[in-house]
Amino acid sequence: MKIALITNYHTTNYGAVLQAFATKKVLSQYGEVKTINYFNPHLGRKLDLIRFELSIQGIKMMVHDILRFKDRNKVVKKIKKFIESNLNLSKLVTQHDIQNGAINYFDVYVCGSDQIWNPEVISKNGELDPTYFLSFVKKPAKKISYASSMGSYRFRDFEKKQIKNFLKDFTTISVRESDSQEMLSQLLEREVFHVLDPTLLLSKEEWLEALKIDKNYRSQKKDYILVYVVQKTPLLKKVVEFAVNQFGKKVVIIDQAFKPFTKADFHIRDAGTIEFIELFSNASLVITDSFHGTCFSINFKKPFVAVCPAWHGGNRIESLLNLFNLKDRFINDEKDIDKLSVDFDYEFLGNKLQEERAKSIKVLSSSIVS
């Protein structure tokens, strides 16, 4: 069976690259998987060494990339190497190529995860991209959505009409957030599944084995608080300061910023995907505002705190935490900091994770082999 995967991976965002890897690995149980090397003009620049666009934000981004050029060069090289070595990419194709049949030779097409249905993420003009809805696929090939995400975006009426048309002949539709499941179920008047993010389909042991990381590897940094954030905010800084005072551990910040947003013992600006997993695997405590940072904290059973993201709603993180009865991990306001606790029921978490993983894999499996 030939399976095509269309997803968002062309970026230095660790979570996006690792979810693509996990999806491809799980799909490989059912056949030969190709990740479609789709050139999306908006996302295509994410791996440029110096990014630029004609706007105030674009100029700031360019200056930032220049200031941290040495580290960014290392990150981009590591991530490109990981993508090329692990995703089994197709030839590079544009939307025009795809719509004209360039990849119409697969039995199953899977689109999924990482906000591919959020027009604010995947399009410069804020428009839905039909490619991520498999609009080009011809029968009898199957169309499957696995854990597709729209983040916190709320579709307008004309977009709902588009989506209804895009999704009308999908074999199975599953999404990553519970509120997205509810909305699409009502809109489409059919069953839509709520499933785990692909990164949660692999256990910690499977991650370490897949990336050839020694399970006995121990970081020289030892007994540290790992801080992995996307947007630096005063709330995040206060959470980190509180945790340091409370637990007295060293702080390791992993990001790609020119300088750390708060005091840190180690600031890692050039990590690749493998180092990212190693740092999560060995952390004593994680503080994050990232959805995938939360995923890996749960998956690796790490004490963690999830801080509400600054630039978008926290629905992705809250949906995940609610599923695992961990909503008390979520810090939405400064007043929540004093209630911060890192104790939780590891046995319940382990059992719940196995249960949800089995349910999600069943949805995917039955979609492909039925």
Image: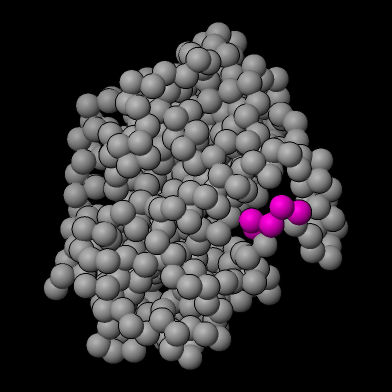
Q: Position of residue 18 (x, y in %)?
A: 44, 48
> Residue at 65% of width from left, 34% of height from top?
269
Does residue 48 show up magenta in the picture? Answer: yes
Give x and y (percent) for residue 306: 50, 35
Taking depth in this image into account, of 21 and 365 the one nearest to the observer is 21
Q: Residue at x 35, y 27 (%)?
A: 214
Please say whether residue 310 is one of the residues in the magenta stretch.
Answer: no
- 310 displayed left or right of 327: right
In this view, 265 is above or below 183: above
What is the residue that sits farthest to the left in this orientation?
370
Q: Residue at x 42, y 18 (%)?
A: 218
Q: Main secondary structure of the magenta part?
A: loop
Q: Is residue 194 above or below residue 117?
A: above
One can see residue 260 in this view: yes
**Depth check, front residue: 342 or 56:** 56
Query: From the viewer's perspective, is 358 left or right of 67?
Result: left
Res 315 visible: no
Q: Quadrant of residue 336?
A: top right
Q: Is the C terminus in the top left, top right, bottom left or bottom right quadrant?
A: bottom left
Q: Is residue 237 above or below residue 137?
A: above
Q: Which residues are magenta?
A: 46-50
Percent x, y of residue 45? 67, 62
Residue 342 appears at what percent x and percent y? 42, 21
Q: Is residue 367 above or below residue 194?
A: below
In the image, 221: left or right of 88?
right
Splitting the image into 4 quarters, where does residue 119 fall?
A: bottom right
In the picture, residue 57 is in which quadrant? bottom right
Which residue shows up at 55% across the image and 59% down it?
A: 10
